[in-house]
Amino acid sequence: MLLNHFTSLDAIPGILVHGLLPREKDTVSPKEVFDLTDMFRLPVVWLTREERPRDGMLLSDRMEARITVNLPSNGKRLVAWPNELQKLPEWREAERGARLVNGVDTSLWWMYFGTIAPERIVGVETFSGEPIGPITLGEDVDRSDPFVIALVKTLQRLAIPLAS
């Protein structure tokens, strides 16, 4: 299943090395989710079928690029957001069957519990239309480091140039 994640341009090099990481700060466990605000504190990676962020999306940071990932649709870590919303008492009572949260169609959103490996990334695009890259490695970077080797392979696979 092809899904998108929106991010800032500054975050792209780290994502290409480490993958998409779930939220790490100020998180709650699924058992501690009692309302919609708590849900946004889950340690997950938010993904969508939306092509671009739009007003009303509860997103932080600058949304300057779209990262597209290919994930198995039957994986246990990938959960459709509406399925989780139906577990909330406030949602069941007040908005049963509703698909919109702040004008956003929840049927297009997914949560991934875990890290999405860089190998799952199949595309990186800016919303400005500018190409990604070239990515510059500092002179002090050890090019034999496994993370650097993985980054270079990912850049090659995605046709993102590496500055010399």
Image: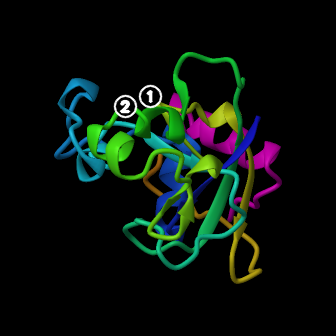
Q: Is residue 19 visible?
A: no
Which residue is at a point 54% across and 64% down the rendered structure image? Answer: 104
Q: Quadrant of residue 76?
A: top right
> Bounds of the magenta span?
143-164
Residue type pointed to by label 2: Lys
Q: Position of residue 91 (x, y in %)?
A: 36, 45
Specify whether residue 64 is painted magenta.
no
Q: Is residue 79 visible?
A: yes
Which residue is at a point 44% across and 27% down the rendered structure image? Answer: 114
Horizontal relation, residue 69 to residue 106: left or right:
right
Horizontal relation, residue 43 to residue 62: left or right:
left
Residue in the foreground of this view, choosing between 53 and 13: 53
Which residue is at a point 72% across and 64% down the rendered structure image? Answer: 51
Residue in the foreground of this view, choosing between 137 and 159: 159
Residue with the mark numbered 2:
87
Q: Position of residue 116 (x, y in %)?
A: 55, 33
Horizontal relation, residue 66 to residue 86: left or right:
right
Q: Position of residue 70 (x, y in %)?
A: 74, 35
Residue type pointed to by label 1: Phe
Residue 50, relative to residue 75: is it above or below? below
Residue with the mark numbered 1:
113
Horizontal relation, residue 70 to residue 139: left or right:
right
Which residue is at a point 62% across and 18% down the rendered structure image? Answer: 75
The image quadrant where one finds the N terminus is top right
Badge 1 or badge 2: first in the primary sequence: 2
Residue in the foreground of this view, choosing between 137 and 156: 156
Label placed on residue 32? none
Circle 2 packing at 10 Å, graded few (<14), some (14-19), many (20+), is few
Residue in the foreground of this view, choosing between 89 and 40: 89
